[in-house]
Image (cartoon, helix red, strand yellow):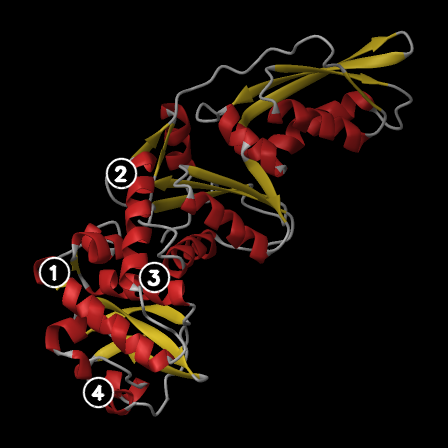
Amino acid sequence: MKRRLRALCAALAASLLLTGCSSVLSGEIRIVTPYVTPTSQGPGRIKEVETYEELKSAAVDFILNMEEKGMVRVFSYDGDIENDVISVCNDIPENHPIGAFALSGMEGAATKIVSYYEVEFSFIYNTRITPEYLNGIVTVSTLRYFKAGLLTKLTSYSGFSAMLTNNLTLSAEDALKYVEETYYEHPLDIVMAPVAAVEIFPDHGTSRLFFFTFGYRYEPSTLKVMDDSLKSAVSSMVESVSATNRAAALLTLCRRLVEFVKYDSDTAAGEYNNQHISATAYGALVTGTAVGEGYAMAYKALCDRLGITCFVVLGNLGDMEHAWNIVEIGGDYYHIDPAMCAVHGIPGGFLKNDADMMDAGYTWDTGRYMTCDGTLTYEDVLRG
């Protein structure tokens, strides 16, 4: 995925800001936001400062409130206030995450008033900026909280996420990878993947703001109804299944999935993305039709409900993009391909090791997933 840093995509960024639209990386979905006129400064909003950092902080506060102008009174200032106002006006739009994100420019002027100075700032906002975006900025200090912030937004089917970081050296590709990982790790909580894009402000330094836009095939209200239907379907399918004997439980879940879901061979043979219903757990467990990815997402959702460790593997089967699962039994890992269990029978896709899968024409990023070298077989599970 191409990096969407402003320094690398100046022309594109300019067009987005002029139209008030932020396009997503792929697909036909667009997110359109109306331009909001900045608010004028109200009474009682004059700030008092004594240092350069306080002056800068006051200006950022005005921006966060999306104010058109802001007044600051300067007392006992240690420095050249007039030069520092110029410095702040140059620094914030270029180097401060909030300013680089929200502004296309700012100006300031210092006026001597007997024993103090009054500094008036004025702000020019990027046309796509809204109070919702500015109010939605959250600060995250670690990768763990970064991923937790993504999960919160994705499970609520929000159209954006704005996260301010101080020491995370992530690229745009890294950030989008975590969106993908979050989706595949939570099929029970995120009924459909978003088409995602990210911009990073500024494109340098360690203090940066990551602004994600998420586009969905359906409205959030529809996705939440689908989410409820999926959870209900999962509850029904795991009914009476006990995870005490993990291998037996995995076989029971695979059998139920094979019996209920029809393999969508037409979609599998063509081009589709993870927003296609057949590529989702919802498609498998609610509509009863799925491609390999839908089977894999459904199988993970079932395992998650029972507390069984399960991962979705993205790879290829021959020349076809495909997805299946890796599960953990007694400290060992195994492949299970519920889609191919449906097509060719359970013995052909249940509890396989890496060598079995490679011999069958599967390829995947072996460095990304657990090594599967367990010795348990389908026949062992049948014998109990």
- Secondary element type, mark 4: helix
Q: Are marks 2 and 1 in contact (CB under 8 Å)?
A: no
Tell me, for residue 301, which label it has, or none: 3
Residue for point 31% across, 68% down: 240
Residue for point 56% across, 34% down: 100
Q: Earlier in the sequence, mark 3 or mark 4?
A: 3
Q: Quadrant of residue 237?
A: bottom left
> What residue does disc 1 label?
264
> What residue does disc 4 label?
359
- Secondary element type, mark 3: helix
Q: Amino acid at mark 2?
A: Tyr
Q: Nearer the viewer, mark 2 or mark 4?
A: 2
Q: Nearer the viewer, residue 299 or 80?
A: 299
Q: Are marks 3 and 2 in contact (CB under 8 Å)?
A: no
Q: Nearer the viewer, mark 1 or mark 3?
A: 3
Q: How far apart are labels 3 and 4 at the CA level?
A: 28 Å
Q: Earlier in the sequence, mark 2 or mark 1?
A: 2
Q: Earlier in the sequence, mark 3 or mark 2?
A: 2
